[in-house]
Image (cartoon, coloured by chain):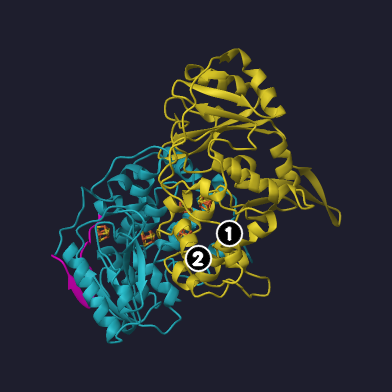
Chain colours: A yellow, B cyan
Amino acid sequence: MQILNKNKLKAALNKLAETADVFVPAARGENSGFYSWKTFDQEKDELMLEALNVYLPPKNVLFPQTERMYSFQEEGSGVVIKESFEDSSPTVIFGARACDVAAIDCFDDVFLTRGYEDTFYKSRRDNTTIIANACYQPGPNCFCASMGVNPTDPATADIIIRDTGEDYVWEARTEKGTALTQKIADLLENKEVKIPELQAFSKNVEYDGVAAKLKGMFEHPIWDKLSEACQTCGICTYVCPSCYCFDIQVKSFGEEGYRFRCYDSCMYREYSQMAGGHNPREDAKERFRNRFLHKLEFFQERYGKPLCVGCGRCIVACPAGISITEIIKEIKEA
Amino acid sequence: MKDISNKIKEIAKKLLENGQVDIFMAWEKGEYPFQTKPFFARNTEEADKIIFDEYSIHNLSNSLLKFRDRPEKIGIVVKGCDSRGIVRLLEDNQFQRERLYIVGVNCPGMKDPLKAMKNNSGFGKKTEEEDLADKCRNCMQPNPVIYDEILGDIQEAHLEGDRFARVKEIENMSPDERYSFFEESLSKCIRCYACRQVCVACNCRTCIFDETKPQWVGRESSSSDNMMYHLVRASHMAGRCVECGECERVCPVNIPLMLINRKLIKDVDQFFGPYEAGMEYIEGAIPPLSVYRENDPDDFI
Ligand code: SF4
Ligand code: SF4
Ligand code: SF4
Ligand code: SF4
Ligand code: SF4
């Protein structure tokens, strides 16, 4: 099998970075997320390939928090579009975990299927190669396997790397993956190594049947109780790799300006505010319910899978200690 | 603390049983030993779950806002910082004193469940275990300032040195240095607005950041919009922030919100004080910067 010795990792990243913007999991100050290798500070930043995962998911690579769409200018009595900002620069996501890859699959469903193609997303996605880092030691908040994700074999990754201690087993899965592999071919070696065994999950949840059950639970009193502690702070939606809601806004300066989109969150009151003043989700309960129904029922109905990939980030980050696995359990018991 | 926890439980049961309150706000245990989370008990059976331990850091006073337009009578447990939040709500006319039964706890200092969760998660780098949460290491008022009943022994302030030390450092920077410091630190803000949502002083019914006509602050996560957000948030806190530290504690990307808040606390104290917000509740008292006078000597804000 092909392997990349860990001593050659930085050389490989440098090589890949010659022709693409490579995003790596790293700790930067007190934070961690996927940062461009170009901006990686060898002294201050720390590669996090060996950590379980990083706190902020790689979703910003394909779906930036703020993304310019097009600029416009007033001309005569009308407006003309000056420039459209579709980004087709080659990009690599290096070392995403299976849950985060599965979340990108959800984005693909939303932005590319059902007769609607988001060209901004598509142009990024087509030019992005995903190198997944297989997981063998799930953390205390991981429950991806319960949500239908295989931690050691993210199906849609272009390349899978497997950490054996000294080396990464390197396995190209797609044409894109093979093309990228060729770029670092001289850094790879052939060697038989032992692939680690997947350790048991400490967190498991029974998701089967939840979507069907939720169908009849819109008015269930359980939502009052479950949502009580929630402060609708929105952190869960921002750290979630699969939350994709956005808003389209405009910035204008005199006779010109641009449109951009930015993350939005169903946890905000303004999110469901309507032009006439009515808000169908005025209270925390309604917003909270929407988040879980979207993740566990609506998405399942539309795309045949939940919109939760079991990464556990929301559980770790919620100031009110709200846990989606506990909620799934409560729904089952209700 | 076990003792206090049991007493709180008893009080909650008594109040719920004799109908003195409809809801009793305290904490319960979450999934992990270090996870203590807000809990609202509605009957004596539920009250059995109530707990007070070294992780009961979450300021519950903000949760009262969920009930501001409703009739329920509410029992609530407050530490020193939380109690100043109650004063904030009373002074801002967001809650009526008669609707509250306040159980104060003289606070020995707390640990932060969010930090512990993060450290236990495998996400990113581990930080050192701390005996006292950041916010408690700068706490000047661990003893509740308003209550109907008080538990625990009076505590000394937990201040470790001058709580304005870092503010002074920043004040002494050159304007350029200062600008790049803030540009650097605020560039990380993901604009989730969690710092607003958890803040007891952020009690406006329609927040300026949610206004769309006109939109006062842009929604881009860019250096200029981020700075605008933080400038507006901070100035709205002038004379109102009760230093509970929740904003900084929950911020998912560690923005130094307390540094900004403390600068304003220091300035308000210096220019309009002596004043510390939320230190006592006097009915009808009007805190600095909350007065509107037509003959104000300054003609702008
Ligand atoms: S992180 Fe927790 S408190 Fe914040 S919106 Fe999500 S569930 Fe609610
Ligand atoms: S809902 Fe929570 S556990 Fe599920 S994918 Fe989002 S952050 Fe991860
Ligand atoms: S800030 Fe003060 S009162 Fe609040 S939890 Fe910490 S020590 Fe206790
Ligand atoms: S400062 Fe922190 S909590 Fe506030 S909006 Fe920015 S990222 Fe969110
Ligand atoms: S600004 Fe921060 S410290 Fe001040 S009252 Fe609000 S949450 Fe507490």
- The image position of residue B81, as x and y in percent, is 28, 63
Name the residue at 50% across, 69% down. A284
Name the residue at 22% across, 75% down. B10
Badge 2: chain ID:
A
Q: Amino acid at mark 1?
A: Leu
Q: Is residue B98 above or below residue B260?
A: below
Residues A319 and B19: in front is B19
Q: Residues within 10 Å of mark 1 (few under 14, many from 20)?
A: many
The numbered disc on residue A331 is 2
Q: Is residue A167 left or right of residue B261?
A: right
Q: Is residue B109 left or right of residue A191?
A: left
The numbered disc on residue B64 is none
Which residue in the structure is indicated by mark 1? Answer: A296
Mark 2 secondary-structure assignment = helix
Image quadrant in which you'd find residue B235: bottom left
- Same subunit, labels 1 and 2: the answer reads yes
Q: Is residue B93 visible?
A: yes
Q: Amino acid at mark 2?
A: Ile
Label located before the other in sequence (1 or 2): 1
- The image position of residue A201, as x and y in percent, is 44, 44
**Highlighted range, magenta:** B139-153
Q: Is residue B128 magenta?
A: no
In the image, farthest residue toward the left:
B153
Name the residue at 62% across, 18% down. A184
Q: Is residue A64 visible?
A: no
